[in-house]
Image: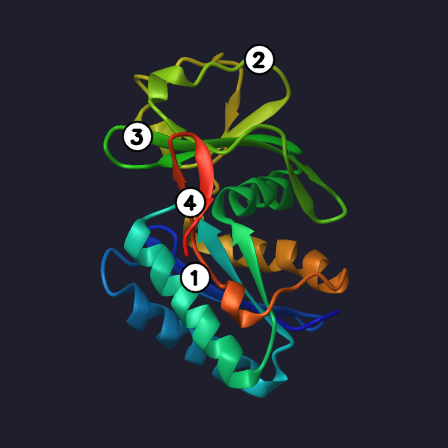
Amino acid sequence: MSRILSINSASDFCSVTIFDAAGITTRSAPTERGHGDAVLEMVDQVLKETGYSKNSIDALAFACGPGAFTSLRIGAGITQGLAVGIDRPIVPVSSLAALAHGVYRNYQRQQTLVAIDARMDQVYFAAYETSALGESKLLSEVRVCDPAELVWASGPWATVGVGWEVYADEIKVDEALKYVGVGAEDCAIDVAYLAQKVVNEGKALSAEFALPVYVRDRVVHRAS
């Protein structure tokens, strides 16, 4: 198993995790401002707790979006800087896929509808199916839309993400859908889980590809 350092700064909660054969070491905190300083401090904390050096890390992963514009760029920039400094590959992981994986990890629910607040009275939305093999498969397009546009049939779905709470009065979905309270506070753990599979398959990328992903007009765009 590779040793992965993962970073999530895609929301108002920042988290950093080291994941390897020895287990999981993580730090998280609510962070409305100062994401950069918070993430760097957490990196130092998890390295100190594990006794690992930066050079012992095999790969770095980060939540690449969607999420808040500035915080996404901060997470991508820190990941790229660390990766260049120790000459290691990186793995961008969808912040929505990480939340879906968190539902599977905590509740063993495989099919998940993820909605997070996109500001301006909109949400980022996607549907996922997570397998025991450590993969969250995208079942829909990733899009930004008005909450009232979220219409989904009933079924074995769990819903996750602050969008369901913030816009509860506007979202029109079957009441049988189960909301689970997995938030962004431990998202870096699930970023690491999803990245592990990518690294094992030899599909990690060079540091230059540590770029945030933004969603506009219902289409996924990678920032340049």
Q: Residue at x 70, y 61 (%)?
A: 203
Q: CA distance from mark 3 to mark 2?
A: 21 Å
The residue at the point 54 percent across, 57 percent down is: 92
- Name the residue carrying label 1: 15
Q: Amino acid at mark 1?
A: Ser
Hey, what amino acid is under mark 3?
A: Val
Q: Is residue 193 left or right of residue 175?
A: right
In the visual, does 129 lie left or right of 26?
right
Q: Residue at x 30, y 17 (%)?
A: 169
In front of the other: label 4 or label 2?
4
Q: Which circle's residue, 4 or 3, is located before the other in the chain?
A: 4
Mark 4 residue type: Pro
Q: Is 154 placed left or right of 161 in the picture?
A: right
Distance in Å between CA atoms under marks 4 and 3: 17 Å
Which residue bears the numbered disc 3? 166
Q: Earlier in the sequence, mark 4 or mark 1?
A: 1
Q: Position of residue 220 (x, y in %)?
A: 47, 39
Residue 66's disc is 4
**Number of numbered discs on residues:** 4
Q: Earlier in the sequence, mark 4 or mark 2?
A: 4
Which of the marked residues, 3 or 2, is nearer the chain's N terminus? 2
Q: SS for tag 4?
A: loop
87 or 171, nearer to the observer: 87
State whether residue 128 is above or below residue 17: above
